[in-house]
Amino acid sequence: MSDLPLNSAVRTRFAPSPTGFLHIGGARTALFSYAYARHHGGKFVLRIEDTDLERSTPESVKAIFDAMVWLDLDYDEGPFYQMQRMDRYKVVLASMLEAGTAYKCYCSKEELETMRAEQEARGEKPRYDRRWRPEPGKVLPEPPVGVDPVIRFRTPLTGVVGWDDMVKGRIEFSNEELDDLIIARPDGTPTYNFCVVVDDWDMGITQVIRGDDHVNNTPRQINILLALNAPLPQYGHVPMILREDGQKMSKRYDAVSVMQYEEMGILPEALLNYLARLGWGHGDDELFTREQFVEWFDTRNVSGSPSRFDLGKLKWVNAHYIKQSSVERLAGLVKPFLVASEVNVADEAMLLAAVALYKDRVETIKDLAEQVKFFFVTVAAPQELLDQHLTDAAKPWVAVLASKLSDTEWTKEAIAALMKAVVAESGLKFPQLAMPVRALVCGTTQTPSIDAVLAALPKTVVLARLAS
Ligand SMILES: Nc1ncnc2c1ncn2[C@@H]1O[C@H](COP(=O)(O)OP(=O)(O)OP(=O)(O)O)[C@@H](O)[C@H]1O
């Protein structure tokens, strides 16, 4: 079992279940599969595992697509939907019954419960006792009338099933630990592990890269593939991403959707860079492009232990990408945030100027919107800020500055020269003039160079706010 047959052309897949949004744990797993395929010049396949009819919804399918598009994880084939492949599964089930690698089991729920209770009473691990498994010389019970059977896989009774995991190294299970799992329900619908096996086989998947919550499924899936004489893919199980509180991130336990990061003002390339680095490393490199990641990616450098999500680090990475982005792109991204807070952004030139002034000072696009808001609407400074800076000493000089500004040419240089002159004349220190000006015009004292900020605003607006 150690030398698994390998297909030559790499084909990886991402196979989410559409039972909620795509969270970043799933997204990182998708990213690793994607990067592996791209690194090897192979194909990346998207498969929607929608057989859980109670939990799967079309909205969740859309949510997965939205997140994949936003992150630009472009797939080469698919989306394939398991629900559209039922006929194929049934053909394979029939072939397994025919070959004797699967068999019908007529145990009722009650019988299974009794079996379990008796085993527990004897101190044994509860498991199906294989009473319907055909064996040479064994007499099977008469199939009860009117009962639809399940189909069970005929798991080898002895031996070891193992694989060289691309992330975790050698993993082995004894077949004695595995039971004859149900591969089709009484109504004929196939179960999870069976569908995955047929899909991975039909789709020619050569590397199954998935979360390590699937490690226990892998020996079962390998046994079924072997029974089908299908080629075995390589398996790589990547550790889970944990929430900041250390819990597994899962749709069921309030994980945050990938798209919520867009709403927070995270750039997709920042999230990808952050996720790539989370649980994978290339020396000390923290910031790298998608192309570099694809070039460097190797499952051997994926960490074997779970990683904890760290919003602070994500924001740090995001700040880097914001700095690197063009003013035009950022202006396009920040606009919806401003509009959402009912700020009218009619003056495009002012928006560009404002973004240029603030892009190196923010961690998210949402922050950026907050920071540049005062360009478009008056933001009143908190009273304590005014009390602190708009002192009796400063007030008259703010008025002097305002009157001089009204006649000056509206450039950063002219404004700077004028402020300098007023400072000299007044005997104030520069901040004693600049701080009240900031508070009045911007609603805060935390701003970039005040001459640049004033120059980016219409003169009339500056004068009105200084007079307020
Ligand atoms: N927290 C996580 N960290 C890393 N990978 C994950 C995490 N949760 C799921 N995955 C992986 O993402 C892929 C898609 O998983 P799936 O759509 O079933 O999401 P899920 O969150 O596990 O769902 P559930 O709500 O059933 O827990 C699988 O390969 C799975 O192993």
Image (tube, helix red, strand yellow):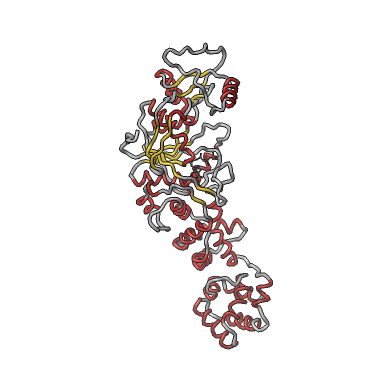
Q: Residue at x 61, y 60 (%)?
A: 343
Image location of residue 374, percent across then percent down:
60, 67
Identity of the residue drawn at 49% across and 35% down: 49
Relative side of 59 to 227, left or right: right
- Locate the N terminus and report the quarter of the image it occupies: top left
All told, the count of numbered labels is 0
Vertical side of 14 occupied by 153: above or below: above
Residue 111 in the image: state x and y as whole percent. Answer: 58, 20
Q: Is residue 332 above or below residue 161?
A: below
At x 32%, y 35%, the residue is 3
Q: Position of residue 260 (x, y in %)?
A: 55, 50
Q: Is residue 87 above or below residue 363?
A: above
Q: Is residue 72 visible?
A: yes
Q: Residue furthest front?
A: 122
Quadrant where the C terminus is found in the figure: bottom right
Q: State the image coordinates of residue 217 (x, y, percent, origin top left).
A: 46, 34
Taking 416 as reference, is 194 above or below it? Answer: above
* Residue 349 in view in this figure: no
In-front residue for pair 254/327: 254
